[in-house]
Image (cartoon, grey):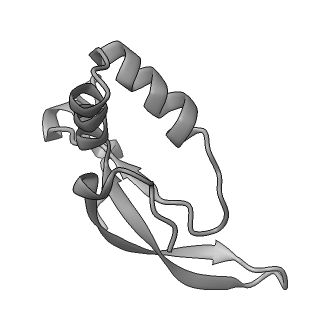
Amino acid sequence: MKKLDGFDDAMFGVASVWQRDEEGGSTQIDTLIYDGDAIIGILMTRDNMTFEEAAEYVDFNILNAYVGEDTPLIAWSVGWEELEDPSGDEDDDEDL
C-alpha cells in the first residue's frame, strides 16, 4: 500500500476497493485512507500554512495525484445535514 509521506498522524484506516484488471475483470485491493481535515491541520501546524494555502496544497499535490492502483483515499468529514438533498425530496435517497 502506498503512503502519503509525512502524514502518518492523518491515517484513518484501510479500505478494500475494486479495481479493473487488464483482462477486463476486477480485483479487490487494499488502500490506505487519510483524514483530509487532519492533513490540512498538519500542513497548517508543521509548515505554518494558512488554511487556504493548505487546502490548495492538498488539492494540487494530493487529490490530483494518481500514483497507481493503490493510490490512497482521502476522506472528508461531513454531517448528515450536508448530505441531504437541498430540495427536500427524500425519495432519491438510497440505502445500501
Q: Is residue 12 left or right of residue 68?
A: left
Rendering quarter of residue 11: bottom left
> Residue 12 or 28: which is nearer the viewer?
12
Is residue 61 something one can see in this rendering?
yes
Is residue 84 something one can see in this rendering?
no
Residue 81: horizontal and vertical position, in percent?
15, 33
Rendering quarter of residue 55: top left
Question: Number of numbered discs present?
Answer: 0
Quarter holding the C terminus is bottom left
Q: Is residue 72 left or right of residue 15?
A: right
Rendering quarter of residue 95: bottom left
Q: Is residue 47 left or right of residue 56?
A: left
Residue 13 higher or lower than 92, as above or below: below
Residue 39: horizontal and vertical position, in percent?
30, 41
Residue 85 higher or lower than 29, as above or below: above
Residue 47 higher or lower than 15, as above or below: above
Which residue is at 26% across, 26% downward?
A: 44
> Residue 72 or 85: which is nearer the viewer?
72
Which residue is at 67% across, 82% downward?
A: 26
Furthest toward the front, the residue is 47
Residue 82: horizontal and vertical position, in percent?
21, 31
Residue 92: horizontal and vertical position, in percent?
35, 44
Which residue is at 32% across, 27% downward?
A: 47
> Residue 43 or 40: which is nearer the viewer?
43
Residue 41 higher or lower than 75, as above or below: above
